[in-house]
Amino acid sequence: MNNHHKILLLLFNLFSFFLTAQELQNLSYKKILNLYAGYPENDSRAMVFVNRYLEKAKKEHSLKEQINGYEEAIYYTESLNRKLSYADSAISVAFKTNEPDVVSRAYLGKGIIYYYNSREYKNALELYLKAYKFSQNSEDDYLKNKIIYHLGIVKNYLGYYQEASEHFKSTSRYFEKQLKQKLQPNIRLNNEAGYFNSIYGLSNCYKNLGLYEKEDSLINLGLQKNQNINEHLLEYGYFQKGKGVQLLRKGQQDKALKHLELSRDILLNNQDYGSLTTVYFYLGKLYWLKGNKTESLHYLNKVDSLVSKFRLMSPEIRSNYQYLISDAKQNGDSKRYSYFVHRLLKADSDQNDELPMMLSKINQEYDNDGLSRENQLLENKNQNLSYLFLLIPVGLILSIYLLSFWRRVKERKITEKYNEILKKFNERNSILKTEPIADNKTEHKKEPYSPEIIEDIKVKLKKFEENKLFLAKNLTLPKVAKMLGRNHSQLSYVLNEHLDITFTHYLKTLRIGYITNLLVENKLYLQYKVENLAHECGMSSRQLFSTHFFEINGIRPIEFIRERIKENEEK
């Protein structure tokens, strides 16, 4: 905190001192709120008045106003630990109300702190699931959609891009529908924020799925519709980031720079370090492409600093380390090279340890079918029955036609993918045989481990594959390293640097290859249920298996089985 800020804070403390206890007691909650309503988020000057708000609520034993006070404290407090402490207090008071909706909102609020302020997805997910549990019988559609949105954020992080996109489509429809109604100013602002965040989340899913035209369309839509920039400055910063990335992808570096710098300033001012980290990466990449290594490394090193502080990991951040490692290689700086390799391996290791638990939790505790039912109820809740009866015949005919067309297109694509897999199988005579992976080591680089250790790990990995040890359940990087008689850093280094593959991708490639091989060669396995196939190759859930099968083969396991059975019957 600088001296100017300290002086201002002192002046506000003195001002509050002159407000006597009697005067404060006579002020309404609304009037106290108006004393600090103009301050931005994380501005600690407001806490002088927020504390008075809380004191009044406690003295009057108003549970509702106590919760409001704690929510205000969360908004204006700069310290992460204090935000979490106030969130705990809000949860404690919420339980005293005996109202599930209030408890749900309190849990959601704490989860948002973990996500927004420190990107701790594991802690955020646990709280989102608690919020979901308490909201199941709620009639508060806004609350339900807010939870659906945040679960979509987690699914996007886990790599369930298609499923996450359904969350964001659902919530964007809801918020857009609400905005067509006459709403109070604050309620309108909340629904506008929900809409902008939903379409931005959807644009991220499209980016991760490689659907760049759809992503670009949503980014442009967000910038076009966000007319009230001062009220939605953070969301404006997100769309500016998206526009910058879009222009950078198209090679328009100078235009991209303006958008990324604007986004940087907004996100930095709002202390959204998770989003800021990705902006720093793209600025680093942009300057790298322009040949300005000094400025590029300035931003790439900023990313490393934030990763160190917040344990962030994403595809962009992984690429950030690849740039830093490449620079260290080019300059023959073995110390920096080893440091950045270690940072990347550590981040990968942390993610590998965290993701299986999160996948298990979200599959076990959040019912996707329930989401579909919920969305249907929300869509139909206020429909006019007379319009419905008029539209049913037309809609039914149109739906049958579109469904038939869509099925033909989808079936053709599935058949093409299936034939591609069989072609590869016939060429290699085994789906498990992969093309040789080029060794990535360079002439001038100094290896952190001896050639004997690296070669030993390669030999043992070959035996690991031949003996099908990858079929064991609950395998992690440390466990496999122990099986090979090495530590996890050594194994991860060889996989990443010499075989150009992460541990997670290596494991799922072997497992899916093994199962695909069985489905091609042995008709018996075509009768297995998907969950049984998952267990057969060591995977913990049907959903995880289906996702990985699609990622490796391009079609779902049930689609592959159907095509295989059809082909066998035609022979």
Image (cartoon, rainbow, N blue to C red):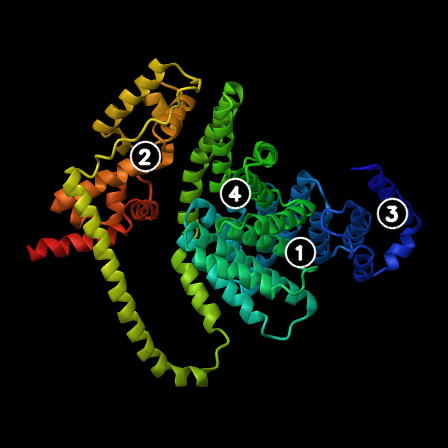
Side (left or right) of 503 relative to 74: left
Q: Earlier in the sequence, mark 3 or mark 2?
A: 3
Mark-to-mark CA distance, 2 and 4: 23 Å
Residue found at x 17% / y 42%: 425
Crowdedness of circle 1 by 10 Å Cα count: few (<14), some, many (20+)?
A: some
Asked where in the image residue 471 lies, by quadrant, the reply is top left
Q: Earlier in the sequence, mark 1 or mark 2?
A: 1
Mark-to-mark CA distance, 1 and 2: 43 Å
Residue denoted by label 2: 507
Crowdedness of circle 3 by 10 Å Cα count: few (<14), some, many (20+)?
A: some
Crowdedness of circle 2 by 10 Å Cα count: few (<14), some, many (20+)?
A: some
- Please tell me whether mark 1 or mark 2 is closer to you in this view: 1
Residue 284 image offset from top left, x and y in percent:
56, 39
Q: Earlier in the sequence, mark 2 or mark 4?
A: 4
Q: Nearer the viewer, residue 359 or 562?
A: 562
Residue denoted by label 4: 121
Q: Residue furthest front?
A: 291
Mark-to-mark CA distance, 3 and 1: 26 Å
Q: Quadrant of the C terminus?
A: bottom left
Image position of 304 with respect to 368: above or below: above
Q: Earlier in the sequence, mark 4 or mark 1?
A: 4
Side (left or right) of 268 relative to 398: right
Q: Quadrant of the N terminus?
A: top right
Residue denoted by label 3: 12
Residue found at x 41% / y 44%: 359
